[in-house]
Amino acid sequence: MAKDRFDPPEMAQYTPAAKRGGTGGGGSVYATIVTGLSYSDASDIDHYTIRLLTDTTAAWSAETTYAAGQYVIKSSKKYISAANDNFNHDPEEAQSAWWTLVPDIEIHESWLDKSLSRDLRYYVTWFTAGEIIKVKSEAVNGTTTYYLDETMTWAGSDAISSLRWSETANRARAVVV
């Protein structure tokens, strides 16, 4: 498991902006990387999937009865119970009327460069699954968007850069352009 770069203070103070009554963009919150970036032919991933550390959703248990609206985590996916008296119904069952998959939070941009729409794979450093990062949120017209709130270096597009992040070496490396 990746070593945390910092130990966040009490999680209670890192509530998403929407829950604090703001519209976002204020303070940072902490999140865990669930899925990192990839720059290969097999799995080309241009965004991070995260879970907020303030999300204290419990793991699904076959021995628990869930009410409608209760959340669970199973196999790194979040589900919401669609009905009361939801007992021993596996969220991963195909065509389940008992559970609805909750979409993951995806991050496609850096907070400081959000107006530039730059591909996150063109920055160094990359963050790996399990790492704790800072994120900011912004609510616009009822939709909340999350951004990385980390200091990152823009390496440039493929046409102008000779620096790329190496997934295997876990560091920036020179490349032939």
Image (cartoon, grey):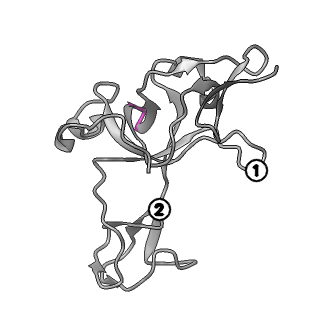
The quarter holding residue 9 reads top left
Q: Residue at x 67, y 17 (%)?
A: 156
Q: Residue at x 41, y 37 (%)?
A: 144
Q: Which residue is mark 1?
A: 42
Q: Which residue is mark 2?
A: 77
Q: Position of residue 118 (x, y in %)?
A: 62, 23
Q: Nearest the camera: 136 or 161?
A: 161
Name above or below for residue 72 compared with residue 23.
below
In screen coordinates, is 42 left or right of 68?
right
Name above or below for residue 134 compared with residue 62.
above
Name above or below for residue 124 compared with residue 53.
above
Q: Which mark is residue 105?
A: none
Determine the residue located farthest toward the top in the rendered image: 160
Which SS does the magenta portion mostly show? strand
In which quadrant is the C terminus drawn?
top right
Q: Nearest the camera: 127 or 108?
A: 127
Q: Sequence-wise, which precedes: disc 2 or disc 1?
A: 1
Please state which amino acid type lies under the numbered disc 1.
Ala
Circle 1 sits in a helix, a strand or a loop, which is it? Answer: loop
Q: Position of residue 115 (x, y in %)?
A: 54, 18
Q: Residue at x 25, y 37 (%)?
A: 8
Q: How many marks?
A: 2
Label 1 environment density (alpha carbons within 10 Å; few <14, some 14–19, many ≥20): few
Label 2 environment density (alpha carbons within 10 Å; few <14, some 14–19, many ≥20): some
Mark 2 to mark 1: distance in Å? 22 Å
Q: Which portion, as a residue range, is magenta?
A: 138-142
Q: Position of residue 171 (x, y in %)?
A: 59, 31
Please state which amino acid type lies under the numbered disc 2.
Lys
Determine the residue located farthest toward the front in the rendered image: 169
In screen coordinates, is 164 left or right of 123?
right
Q: Position of residue 139 (x, y in %)?
A: 39, 32
Q: Nearest the camera: 143 or 13?
A: 13
